[in-house]
Structures are given as structure tokens and as C-alpha cells.
Image (spheres, grey):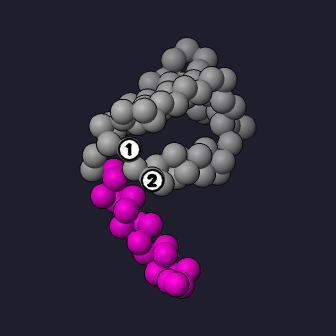
Amino acid sequence: MKNPEEMNKLLVNDLCLLLLFLQLKVEAQEESFLIKVLSEKIYRRLLMFILEVFQELSPEVLDVVISCVDNFCLEVVGNKIIANNGAV
């Protein structure tokens, strides 16, 4: 079994390669945002990685659509995050 440091290196390498094959689109709308992630292939850790990022960012998510049948498609709609100084 690999130690945690080796596992982290493998994960980082996998994610770097993965980013080469993803289509990512982020759209700011009036009071919300839309994020689309598309991939022609399905990658084992992709959904887990995306969910971990959302957990860290803690945006207010209004709607999520995920499809992993023939390819990977994720669409997320959420409220914009307003900082204390009023910046988005």
C-alpha cells in the first residue's frame, strides 16, 4: 500500500492530466452563477474532486445536474458570493 504522500502525488498528477481534457465554463448571471464541466470520458475521481472544491468554497448551490452515462456533464447554478466589502 502506498503512503499518503505518494497517494497525494498520484492524485495531483491525475488531476493535472484531467484538466487537459475538460471543458470548463463559468458564467456570471445577474444574481447567480452557472458552472458547466464537460468531458467526453468519465474519470474515476472527477466528481469527488469537484465536490471537495465546492465543499471548501461553500457557495450557496441552487441546482445541480450530473450525468455520467456516456460522458461526464455537471451543471451547477448558485447564488453569487458577496464579500463584506460588497465585491463579488
Query: Was residue 15 drawn as part of the magenta stretch in this picture?
Result: yes
Tell me: residue 77, above or below residue 10.
Answer: above
Residue picked out by circle 1: 42
Q: Amino acid at mark 1?
A: Ile
Horizontally, is 22 left or right of 4 in the view?
left
Q: Is residue 76 visible?
A: yes
Residue 34 locus on image (x, y percent): 50, 25
Query: Was residue 82 drawn as part of the magenta stretch in this picture?
Result: no
Horizontally, is 84 left or right of 69 in the view?
right
Q: Is residue 57 visible?
A: no
Horizontally, is 19 left or right of 87 in the view?
left
The crowd level at tag 2 (other Cα within 10 Å; few <14, some 14-19, many 20+) is few
Q: Amino acid at mark 2?
A: Arg
Q: Are marks 1 and 2 in contact (CB under 8 Å)?
A: yes
Which segment is the magenta one?
1-19
Among all residues in the image, which is located at the extreme top? 30
The tag on residue 44 is 2
Say which residue appears at 36% left-offset and 67% top-offset: 13
Horizontally, is 24 left or right of 32 in the view?
left
Among all residues in the image, which is located at the extreme front? 69
Say which residue appears at 52% left-offset and 31% top-offset: 66
The crowd level at tag 1 (other Cα within 10 Å; few <14, some 14-19, many 20+) is some
Magenta stretch, main secondary structure, is helix
Q: Which of the 4 image quadrants contains residue 10?
A: bottom left
Say which residue appears at 46% left-offset and 49% top-offset: 46
Say which residue appears at 55% left-offset and 80% top-offset: 4
Q: Tell me how many marks there are.
A: 2
